Amino acid sequence: MSKIIVDEQYLEIIEGTNLLQACLENNIYIPNLCYLKERKEKNASCRLCFVEIEGMPKPVTSCTLDVEDGMVVRTDTPAVRRLQRTAFQLLMSVHEVDCAHCPANKKCELQKIARFLKLGLKPKGLDHSLRELETDHDHPFLEYFPHRCVLCGKCIYVCKKRNGRPYLTFAGRGLDTQISFFGDKDPLKLPCAECLACTLICPVAAIIAKTDT
Amino acid sequence: MSKKTHLDESSNLFAQEEAMLNDIRCRLKDYSAERRDLIPILQMIQEKYAYIAPITIQMVSDHLNIGACEVYSVASFYNQFKFNPPGKHPVKVCMGTACHVKGGDIILENFERKLEIKEGKTTPDREFSIERVACVGCCALAPVVVIGETVHGNMAPSKVEGLILGFQIEKEKQARLKEKQARLKEKRDADENGN
Ligand code: SF4
Ligand code: SF4
Ligand code: FES
Ligand code: FES
């Protein structure tokens, strides 16, 4: 067991537990979008899960650290909040905010994080612009909404884990990055009808079953 | 254009595609079935055919035994890989610094609108494709467009339509010429048979 202090709370954690995981399990919320417990190689792409750790010069992403004995962690310093708010607003600057028509409404991670960081969903002081993307809508079972997607990659991970290979991936680069279902669309050759794992893991309802549209 | 030549053209395209697939199938034998050969294979196809068709992506994924979408994911990350066949007249709009400053993006937009395709795409008849390129080396003429091998300097939005029209007129002229020759030949054949 490792003894650590998080925001003045003393915790006993099994050595080697992921720091973000340890905090969440002890009801200390740290905003996060791309963290998945089972995924060994952390994406660390959402840049929301910052904390400050005594002895480290700068805030660090908690999802990429393991608990070590004697760690002193702060999850709510001004530097941490500044980083989180910036990352969140950048994310939202390309997000289509239309909660009333979104199936994730009320159970959406973005709404939760906005509330936690005391921010609106529409970023202030940043341009809001939806990317011009060409998206295929010919998948027999799934529908993808690029302007909701936060590119966390969770869907790709669960699909590959479950089916041995992914049936969806990131395509493109930079601002043009999106999820693509490229490949054979023969309904009989796709495991999707019985699977839908990606739709369940997606934190923002960017992938949903066609039957739900 | 007559209906017959339309049919000819599409069956011609079909034969071309068939030949391409067979050729790529043969060439794939020179590559291992390991993932590290993915990019070399894509480069080979791009170099040989100037684009990577969806069906060839499927072929590569079968060869490497990975998902087609995994191949597409890698390929779509790099600018060097194209997914559309180049047009007969590839339009390269310069987006280098000088051309950018002189409104290259407006020229690009005009081509996109007139040809009704986006940058990176090819018209359905495969006559034109549009691409954005970096400095082509004649900044004094900015904004610059290169169509095929010909450099068009001091471009203006008003010149775009004329350029495209020029190619279309040329094409129709060729078609008329071909038809005329065909008619002449028919007549000659008929005359010969008559004798
Ligand atoms: S439904 Fe299942 S198999 Fe289909 S893309 Fe989603 S996770 Fe993959
Ligand atoms: S579709 Fe959902 S799970 Fe997949 S990358 Fe986008 S937000 Fe993440
Ligand atoms: S959860 Fe750590 S960077 Fe996304
Ligand atoms: S920038 Fe266009 S030719 Fe140099």
Image: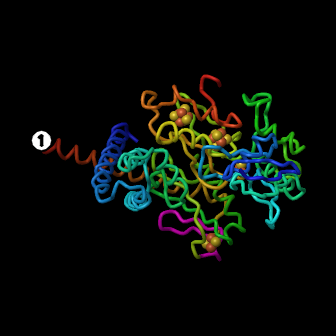
Q: In this rendering, would B179 be left or right of A202?
A: left
Per the rendered image, the range of residues in magenta is: B138-153
On the question of residue A146 being in view, the answer is: no
Image position, residue B135 (x, y; %): 60, 71
Vertical arrangement, residue B42 with respect to residue A104, above or below = below
Can you say which quadrant of the picture contains the C terminus of chain A?
top right
Q: In this rendering, would A26 be left or right of B79?
A: right
Q: In this orientation, which residue lies closer to the viewer: B11 or A193? A: A193
Image position, residue B58 (x, y; %): 40, 44
Residue pointed to by mark 1? B193
Vertical arrangement, residue B157 with respect to residue A143, above or below = below
Vertical arrangement, residue B154 with respect to residue A151, above or below = below
* Residue at horizontal 39 percent and vertical 53 percent from the top: B174
Is disc 1 placed on a helix, strand or loop? helix
Q: Quadrant of ligand 4?
A: bottom right
Image position, residue A59 (x, y; %): 80, 60
Colouring mode (rainbow / by chain / secondary structure / one colour): rainbow
A136 magenta-colored = no
* Residue at horizontal 63 percent and vertical 31 percent from the top: A200
What is the three-letter code of the residue carrying label 1?
A: Asn
Crowding near pointer 1: few (<14 within 10 Å), some, many (20+)? few
